[in-house]
């Protein structure tokens, strides 16, 4: 339908970006991006009006978005060139051909397009050997100045490499190292660095991406005094498993960004960490640091009894517990997980109703009785017969 209107208007339309890469790689992706050779806003107005769809557009950026009745959003942009006035700057845009539009992209694997214009619907377009690089599992930039033009691509390169398990091409790797040596990341807009790091820590392969960041000294560049040693590696690997544990057993949506930041930096002087977190706008991260350091001292001496350990962790937020369980000795974190599981089952143990059935009159004492029973249960002094 879009292709028919494009043809009629004398435009050409293409599906581009991550979705084409993911179709080729047989991965799920619901972000639909369409590039229009011609005028995306004009095309969207016709398309949306004919179908009675909601839409809006940004004249200045030559982009538009349509929302289908299902809620699915489709992004449109006029094919453009981007002109960067300094490394990392938000670029100026000019109309251009699809080839020029694809040339400004970050990596060859992201340059594939599928034409959807009516007379050429379904044709795969591959100007820059994206297909070959997907097959060879390699991340490659399109031209020598790519990282200089936009240093945020340094972060994107390791993110895609980690996510897909791809290598970074030889020349690309050389230029990436050079860009890191030149401290280019430090001139990138801090908001964009925040976005990329957040995406990375939310990736399923976050730990692999962190290893790549370490290998290319990216973290060392962003965080002065950063050290990555065996301890860091251990904590990060345990954190990865803890995130799964908390999400599956306790249905807790873990703040992965804040937790990975803490795992990477808890051993540094606090002012260094805070400086980084503030510069890159990680306010949740900073919050988690504060909470962690406010309870850290409680674990210097771990009590023998589970009921006493329970009293220590009782009021600690889940996200802090996620990190504590990655950082404390394994046998302690196993006990904490055990206690949290028991706490989940607590309602199955005994409730206020059970006390009523025993003929007791409801009173504030109920809570104390139930708490007491739970503590004894934790220490194995009471068994659950249900
Ligand atoms: P994801 O699967 O993470 O959404 P994506 O490839 O869709 O990956 P986006 O960040 O949504 O990535 O970007 C969409 C497209 O825009 C990418 O495929 C890429 O070609 C291009 N792009 C994004 N950021 C840059 C950049 N900094 N430099 C060049 N091209 C970029």
Image (cartoon, rainbow, N blue to C red):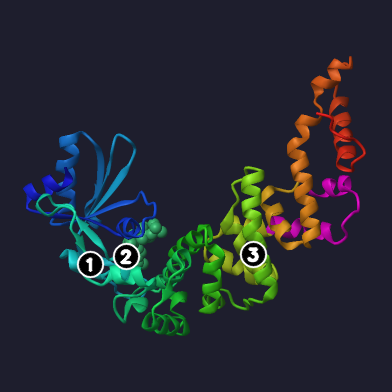
Residue 226, position as x, y percentages in the image? 62, 76
- Residue for point 87% across, 31% down: 368
Q: How much space separates mark 1 and mark 3, taking CA atoms?
A: 38 Å
Q: How much space separates mark 2 and mark 3, taking CA atoms?
A: 30 Å
In the picture shown, does residue 384 fall above or below 2? above
Residue 37, position as x, y percentages in the image? 15, 58
Query: Does the numbered disc 2 mark a residue whose Cβ is under 8 Å from ligand 1?
Result: yes
Q: Report if residue 362 is visible in the image.
A: no
Does 303 lie within the magenta span? yes
Residue interval drawn in magenta: 290-313
Q: Which mark is residue 285?
A: none
Residues marked 2 and 1 touching at CB (< 8 Å) = no
Residue 233, position as x, y percentages in the image? 65, 71
Pointer 2 or 1: first along the chain: 2
The C terminus sits in image quarter: top right
Q: Residues within 10 Å of mark 3 (few under 14, many from 20)?
A: some
Q: Chief secondary structure of the magenta span?
A: helix
Q: Residues within 10 Å of mark 2 (few under 14, many from 20)?
A: many
| Displayed quadrant of residue 327 | bottom right
Say what secondary structure mark 2 lies in: helix
Would you name the residue on which mark 3 appears? 237
Give the mark toward the camera: 2 or 1.
1
Would you name the residue on which mark 2 appears? 110
Residue 384, position as x, y percentages in the image? 84, 33
């Amino acid at each position: 339908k879009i292709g028919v209107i494009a043809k009629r208007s004398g435009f050409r339309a293409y599906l581009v970006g991550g979705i084409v890469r993911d179709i080729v790689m047989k991965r799920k992706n619901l972000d639909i991006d369409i590039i229009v050779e011609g005028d995306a806003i004009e095309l969207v107005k016709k398309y949306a009006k004919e179908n009675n769809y909601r839409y809006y557009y940004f004249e200045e950026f030559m982009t538009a978005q349509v929302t289908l009745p299902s809620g699915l959003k489709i992004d449109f942009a006029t094919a453009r060139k981007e002109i960067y006035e300094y490394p990392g700057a938000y670029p100026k845009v000019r109309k251009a051909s699809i080839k020029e539009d694809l040339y400004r992209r970050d990596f060859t694997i992201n340059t594939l397009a599928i034409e959807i214009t009516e007379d050429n619907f379904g044709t795969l377009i591959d100007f820059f050997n994206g297909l070959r690089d997907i097959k060879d599992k390699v991340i490659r930039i399109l031209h020598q100045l790519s990282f200089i033009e936009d240093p945020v691509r340094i972060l994107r390169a390791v993110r895609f490499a980690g996510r897909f398990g791809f290598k970074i091409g030889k020349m690309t790797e050389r230029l990436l190292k050079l860009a890191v040596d030149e401290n280019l990341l430090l001139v990138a807009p801090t908001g964009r660095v925040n976005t990329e790091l957040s995406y990375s820590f939310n990736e399923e392969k976050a730990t692999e991406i962190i290893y790549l960041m370490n290998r290319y000294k990216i973290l060392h560049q962003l965080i002065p005094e950063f050290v990555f040693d065996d301890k860091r590696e251990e904590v990060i690997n345990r954190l990865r498993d803890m995130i799964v544990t908390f999400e599956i057993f306790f249905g807790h949506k873990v703040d992965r960004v804040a937790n990975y930041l803490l795992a990477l930096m808890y051993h540094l002087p606090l002012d260094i960490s805070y400086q980084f977190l503030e510069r890159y706008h990680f306010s949740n991260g900073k919050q988690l640091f504060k909470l962690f350091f406010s309870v850290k001292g409680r674990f210097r001496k771990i009590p023998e009894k589970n009921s006493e350990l329970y009293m220590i962790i009782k009021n600690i937020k889940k996200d802090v517990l996620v990190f504590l369980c990655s950082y404390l000795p394994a046998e302690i974190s196993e006990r904490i997980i055990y206690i949290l599981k028991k706490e989940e089952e607590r309602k199955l143990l005994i409730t206020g109703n059970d006390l009523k059935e025993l003929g007791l009159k409801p009173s504030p004492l109920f809570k104390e009785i139930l708490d007491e029973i739970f503590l004894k249960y934790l220490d194995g002094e009471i068994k659950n017969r249900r």
